[in-house]
């Protein structure tokens, strides 16, 4: 194994822990949406004007004769239910992974966009070195934000939510997920230090 391959493997291992950190952060945000879903739906429906209800229409009474169950309809119904369950399982496992990738891109994109503003505010020359240095610091800041913000809302869910999920359970899961994210992100930087991976190569 040559030196280049060794460096690539080290970067992959380091950023794998970063991906796990984003995964835990994504689960935090998904849990936050579950906890506050009723409040969000209520807010959306309250701001949307309700259409006037149509006058009640009395339906004629029709004598029906019980029919035998349709076997074909039962089979199609069972297939439909199994399909829905399989789709739900797929979404349950796929959504956090996609959200982790999206979170990673969002953090890197935000750091890339904010870095020139920080350099300008510090009255320093806008060089490639300065941008890389500022971006590494901003990525750490944004990683902390994506962990801390949902944790605060989950801990305060008892005061701000309407009981979709028990506040104690929401807080417990929120702290557990936040702890997992912190451990993964810290482990990422510890491994980067051990493997001599540059800060700008950490995502």
Image (cartoon, grey):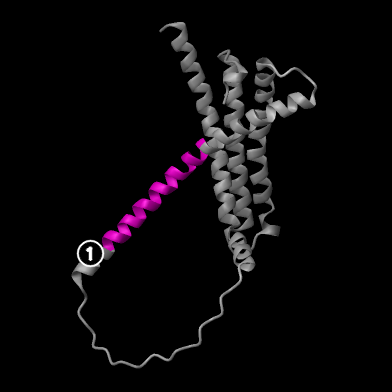
Q: What residue is shown at x 75% (from left), y 17% (from top)? A: 125
Q: What count of labels does the image hold?
A: 1
Q: Nearer the viewer, residue 177 or 124?
A: 124
Q: In the rendered structure, which segment of residues is drawn in magenta? A: 78-101
Q: Is 144 situated left or right of 6 in this image?
A: right
| Magenta residue check for 99 | yes
| Magenta residue check for 202 | no
Q: Is 138 situated left or right of 183 in this image?
A: right
Neighbours of disc 1 within 10 Å: few (<14), some (14-19), many (20+): few
Locate residue 201, reporting x and y percent.
57, 19
Q: Is 56 situated left or right of 176 in this image?
A: left
Locate residue 154, reporting x and y percent.
64, 50
Image height of 162 relative to 143, above or below:
below
Q: Which element is circle 1 on? A: helix
Task: For the C terminus, give its image quadrant.
Answer: top right
Residue tagged 1: 75
Image height of 109 relative to 169, above or below:
above
Q: What residue is shown at x 63% (from left), y 54% (from top)? A: 168
Image height of 135 relative to 71, above or below:
above
Magenta: main secondary structure equals helix
Locate residue 136, reporting x and y percent.
65, 23
């Amino acid at each position: 194994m040559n030196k280049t391959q060794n460096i690539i493997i080290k970067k992959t291992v380091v950023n794998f822990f970063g991906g796990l950190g984003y995964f835990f952060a994504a689960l935090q945000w998904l849990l936050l949406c579950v906890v506050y879903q009723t409040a969000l739906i209520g807010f959306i429906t309250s701001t949307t004007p309700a259409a006037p209800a149509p006058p009640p229409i009395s339906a004629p009474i029709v004598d029906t004769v019980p029919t035998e169950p349709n076997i074909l309809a039962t089979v199609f119904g069972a297939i439909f239910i199994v399909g829905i369950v399989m789709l739900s399982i797929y979404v349950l496992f796929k959504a956090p992974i996609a959200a982790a990738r999206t979170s990673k891109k969002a953090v890197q994109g935000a750091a890339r966009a904010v870095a020139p503003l920080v350099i300008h505010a510090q009255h320093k020359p806008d060089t490639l070195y300065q941008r890389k240095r500022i971006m590494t610091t901003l990525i750490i800041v944004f990683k902390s934000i994506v962990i801390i913000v949902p944790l605060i809302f989950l801990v305060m869910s008892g005061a701000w939510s309407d009981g979709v999920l028990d506040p104690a359970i929401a807080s417990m899961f929120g702290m557990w997920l936040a702890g997992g994210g912190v451990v993964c992100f810290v482990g990422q930087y510890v491994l980067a230090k051990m493997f001599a991976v540059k800060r700008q190569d950490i995502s």
